[in-house]
Image (cartoon, rainbow, N blue to C red):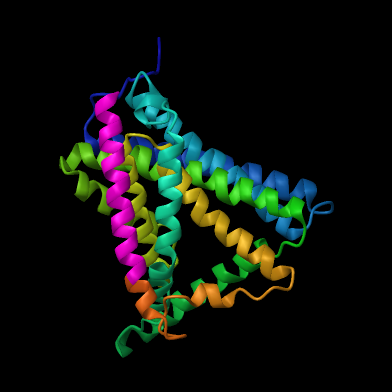
Amino acid sequence: MTFSNIYGTASFWTKIFITLCIMLIMLIISAILIWLFSTSFSNILSQSDILVGSMSIQCIFLFISTAVVAAGLFSSHPFSYLKMDKRPSVTALIGVIICMIVFIPFMNLVISWNQSLTLPENFSAVETWMRNKEATAQLITDQLLNIHSLGALVLLILVIGILTGIGEETLFRGLLQKLLWEKTGNKHAAIWIGAIIFSAIHFQFFGFIPRMLLGAFFGYLLVWSGNIWLPITAHFFNNSITVVFHYIENQGYELSYFEKIGTMENGTWDIAVYSLILFILCSYTLYKYLQKKSLRI
């Protein structure tokens, strides 16, 4: 008896239920492994190293394993199902990086705007709770990114850049977006619903809009190319550039200006407009290239 593709013809809600069950099992396994790891090495490793190790366990089991196991139950070829079986072209990868770079000023503006949002006075208690959650998440992030050596930099890029990129993209784009597309029959609906879920699951409410926009772009990259490695590359770049910036700042260099390019705060919002226009042009060029490439295959 084989467990491969036994739920290939199941309904959307059955597949979602199976995915959630797998996630629950993997969550329990992750929690146990993280507990064992943290208790075993608490006297040897620093708190930031424990965080990195815990994040690695979570990515491998909660995200990657869930996606691969579910894909194996839904298809005889799980890696093909997740669009992981093709090698992307160097040109496409470069195009993705260029799109991400030119998008930065506009994203800075969106991030700044989203962080400045306030809820109506009737929801002040909710807003206080949300901002407390943000502050707690920021403390963890600051502790994680308090890196001063090249070794720590490389390790964080491997975990936050590569491992997190692979994990979140295989689960949210490779699996969830595919299921949503099968259900709705509309690629745009699948992309945006998936992006909303992707952003919401982070529970960082004052970063919801920029993360949703990034998730949507990652989703379109997968649809345009049929290759999960392009959104993984975009995700990797987005996470890794943050890690590198923090490392450089920890060396005593001031980079806050770059984080504010395109915002109202330093009066460069017009750069954000040019950034958006350039991003649209670069994305369209990449889209046309990927369409031509797919026709040649």
Magenta residues, dominant SS class: helix
| 8 sits to left or right of 150 | left
x and y, in percent, of residue 148 in the image: 76, 62
Q: Which residue appears at 53% of the width and 55% of the height?
A: 239
- Residue 293 lies within the magenta run: yes
- Please report the residue visible at 43 percent of the width from the left and 71 percent of the height from the top: 108
Q: Residue at x 34, y 44 (%)?
A: 221
Stretch of the chain drawn in magenta: 274-297
Picture quarter containing residue 122?
bottom left
Residue that appears at 27% across and 25% down: 296
Q: Please identify the residue farthest to the top as the structure is shown.
A: 1
Q: Which residue of the protein is positioned furthest toward the left in this rendering?
A: 185
> Where, by quadrant of the figure, is residue 125 drawn?
bottom left
Q: Position of residue 46 (x, y in %)?
A: 78, 57
Residue 16 seen from this side: no
Numbered label tally: 0
Residue 96 in view, yes or no: yes
Using residue 139 as the reference point, say whether residue 171 is left or right of it: left
Query: Could you tell me which quadrant the N terminus lies in?
Result: top left
* Residue ranking furthest to the bottom: 121
